[in-house]
């Protein structure tokens, strides 16, 4: 009997140790690092809705990147989705600024996609928000900061030097 209990304890500790590793694998595989971090036990519906918003934002960004929708429509819809994401986040008692983070994460994903397609040749760091963006993009997709040189390689930024 003590033997069985020992075995049980071993199994439980293995399971506990393995969990963060599984999470990390899930994160690198792509879809839902944010979504998994909170509310595992409750609010599956909310989580599903957030996944939907996440997917829609991703589609929207890709459409915009491909030139299927004009910037005005992009900004308008992105604003709507951010509000949706924010209200869903509130339901999960998370902070509102995470919806901003959600969008940034999406931009990273899309940027990686575009690099893999060859649409983006060079990436630069935004002098305003420090996020990565297409070197040739006139506006930073995250903070809408307009690069003054209009897309030539950054030498020195007027405000501060960014090295990453
Ligand atoms: Zn920026």
Image: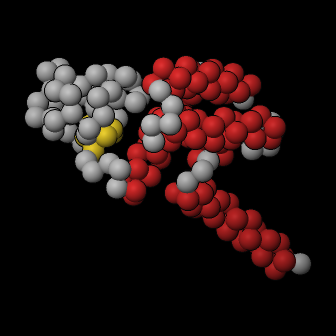
Q: Residue furthest right?
A: 1
Quarter holding residue 34: top right
- Residue 91 in the image: x percent, y percent? 74, 25
Q: Residue at x 68, y 41 (%)?
A: 51
Q: Residue at x 46, y 45 (%)?
A: 110
Looking at the image, can residue 153 be seen? yes
- Residue 154 in the image: x percent, y percent? 15, 35
Q: Residue furthest left?
A: 155
In this picture, residue 64 sits left or right of residue 51? left
In this picture, residue 90 sits left or right of residue 134? right
- Residue 145 in the image: x percent, y percent? 32, 22
- Residue 149 in the image: x percent, y percent? 16, 27
Q: Nearer the viewer, residue 148 or 109?
A: 148
In this picture, residue 156 sits left or right of residue 44? left
Looking at the image, can residue 130 be seen? no
Q: Residue at x 34, y 35 (%)?
A: 131
**Color theme of the render:** secondary structure
Q: Nearer the viewer, residue 13 or 97?
A: 97
Q: Quadrant of the C terminus?
A: top left
How many numbered tags mark residues here? 0
Q: Quadrant of the N terminus?
A: bottom right
Q: Residue at x 40, y 56 (%)?
A: 117
Q: Nearer the viewer, residue 74 or 161?
A: 74
Quarter holding residue 102: top right
In this picture, residue 106 sits left or right of residue 91? left
Q: Is residue 10 above or below residue 99?
A: below
């Amino acid at each position: 009997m003590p033997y069985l209990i020992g075995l049980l304890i071993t199994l439980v500790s293995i399971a506990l140790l393995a969990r963060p590793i599984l999470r990390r694998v899930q994160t690198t595989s792509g879809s839902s690092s944010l979504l998994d971090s909170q509310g595992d036990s409750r609010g599956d519906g909310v989580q599903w809705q957030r996944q939907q918003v996440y997917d829609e934002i991703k589609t929207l960004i890709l459409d915009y990147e491909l030139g299927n929708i004009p910037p005005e429509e992009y900004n308008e819809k992105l604003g709507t989705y951010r509000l949706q994401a924010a209200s869903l986040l509130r339901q999960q008692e998370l902070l509102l600024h995470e919806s901003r983070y959600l969008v940034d994460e999406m931009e990273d994903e899309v940027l990686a996609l575009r690099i893999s397609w060859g649409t983006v040749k060079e990436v630069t760091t935004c002098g305003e928000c420090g996020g990565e963006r297409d070197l040739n993009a006139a506006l930073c997709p995250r903070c809408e900061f307009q690069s003054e040189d209009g897309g030539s390689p950054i030498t020195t930024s007027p405000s501060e030097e960014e090295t990453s």
